[in-house]
Image (spheres, coloured by chain):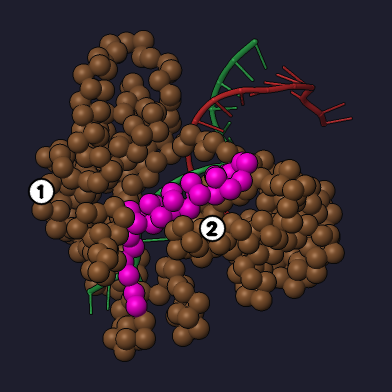
Chain colours: A brown, B green, C red
Amino acid sequence: MARSKEAKALGIKMGVPAFQIQDLIDSGKVLACSSNYALYADISARVMTTLEQLAPAVEVYSIDEAFLDLTGVSNCVDLTQFGQQVRSTIQQWIGISVCVGIAPTKTLAKLANHAAKKWTKAGGVVDLTNKERQRKLMSLLPVSEVWGIGGKLTAKLNKLGINTALDLADAEPAFMRQQFSVVVSRIVQELNGESCSELEQVAPTKKEIVSSRSFGERIICKQHMQEAISEYVSRACQKLRKEQQVAKQLSVFLRTSPFSDKERDPYYANSISTSLVTPSADTRDFISLAVKLLDKIWRDGYRYAKSGVMLSDFYDGVYQGSLFEPEPPSYQSKALMTVIDKLNGSGKGKVWFASQGIKQDWSMKRGMLSPQYTTSWVDLPEAK
DNA sequence: TCTGGGGTCCTAGGACCC
DNA sequence: TCTGGGGTCCTAGGACCC
């Protein structure tokens, strides 16, 4: 799913299943690792904390990206110099290489960052404050590199003769609004240095929480599927409580593999959702509901490859109660969930609900997992 | 035999209100 | 021949992001 520059040079394409390049892996030329979410989250948190010490305002945009507000910084120091300082601090403190792009809007900053990554001569930092430099770079980049322009929009834009990022920047915003949507017209404005996207220092509260996984081995028995669904519900509810929210809506979905031979392994996918009468963050409420929903979409005789759950319709504690149903007592529920969350801490699996199963034979394969250097005691690196 | 796991925003259309 | 004018809420689907 993610490849180093060297792996790309070997011709390994995005999303190629490992078994298709097994020869390369066996040859020792390529090292492949299973996804290690705990490690990535921890390293990311260290980088973000460092950034917060270096800049007056930071928006953590994703696990490996952040926007920094440099208002005022340019009065004191050269911006490229500042970028270099960010780079070297993170390199020294955490050992992670980062690239820095500087520009008046987020969309331009993303392009600057792209340039910093691509042209190693830049030394990892590209300052795009200058209008002429913005236009020069945009003329060199295909429109598909612009943040918010994906495959479908690229095809439509190309038909209109818009091929480079600069072509898009020079398009008429009103025309783009009419041809596409307000999203595209904002992108045009951002490419012209007019900011349409504020820095979001506080992460907005989530609107939905999904927990899903592909199984290590196909599931053919309903009890295993119930275990998996219960496990996902439990994870989702844990996230929900961390957000300090309660949810009303639950969806359950499952599917067989879309890749296998349809003759031998027929395709089936389905999903179903329903609402609680009273919003909740209690794992038990959602597990019992989820098992009932599963009953309705489960079909015997299929080899299921993946399933998951989604929570939505969130409230922060204030919600419309039911006129007819009595309000369930919430105190005991909260106390129990708090104890469970504390026991489980950041790791998983100290206490769990019986319906989550004990062996979990179906769970994700991670045969090539890298050590969890910073989140697991047994994986702590040793200094000799 | 083997193919990831999360999210958000916008729009159109249906259903409803006065 | 011609059938108002102003709203809200919800959902599905499409597009995008990492």
The chain letter for the residue carrying disc 2 is: A
Marks 2 and 1 belong to one chain: yes
Residue A359 in view, yes or no: yes
When the figure is inspected, residue A288 is found, relative to residue B3, above or below; the finding is: above
Say the numbered circle drawn on residue A89. Answer: 2
Q: Which quarter shows the N terminus of chain A? A: bottom left
Q: CA–CA distance between discs 2 and 1?
A: 45 Å
Residue A43 colored magenta?
yes
Q: In which quarter of the image is residue A218?
A: bottom left
Residue A8: x and y in percent read 49, 79
Residue in view at x 41 percent, y 55 percent: A43
Other-residue count near label 1 (Cα within 10 Å), few / some / many at <14 / 14–19 / ≥20: few
Q: Where is residue A72 in the image (x, y as percent from the top left)?
A: 73, 43
In this view, the residue in front, A299 or A63, is: A63
Residue A342 lies in the magenta stretch? no
Residue type, mark 2 in image: Thr
Q: Residue A306 carries which label?
A: none
Q: Circle 2 sits in a helix, a strand or a loop, which is it?
A: helix
Q: What stretch is highlighted in magenta?
A: A31-59
User: Taking A8 as reference, is A35 above or below it?
Assistant: above
Query: Taking A187 as reference, is A119 above or below it?
Result: below
Callout 1, which amino acid? Answer: Ile
Q: Nearer the viewer, residue A170 or A344?
A: A344
Q: In this view, does A287 lie to the left or right of B7?
A: left
The image position of residue A167, as x and y in percent, is: 80, 65
Q: Which residue is found at the position 32% from the left and 83% from the top?
A: A25
Comparing A383 with A17, the one in front is: A383
| Residue corresponding to mark 1 | A358
Q: Is the magenta stretch mostly helix, strand or loop?
A: helix
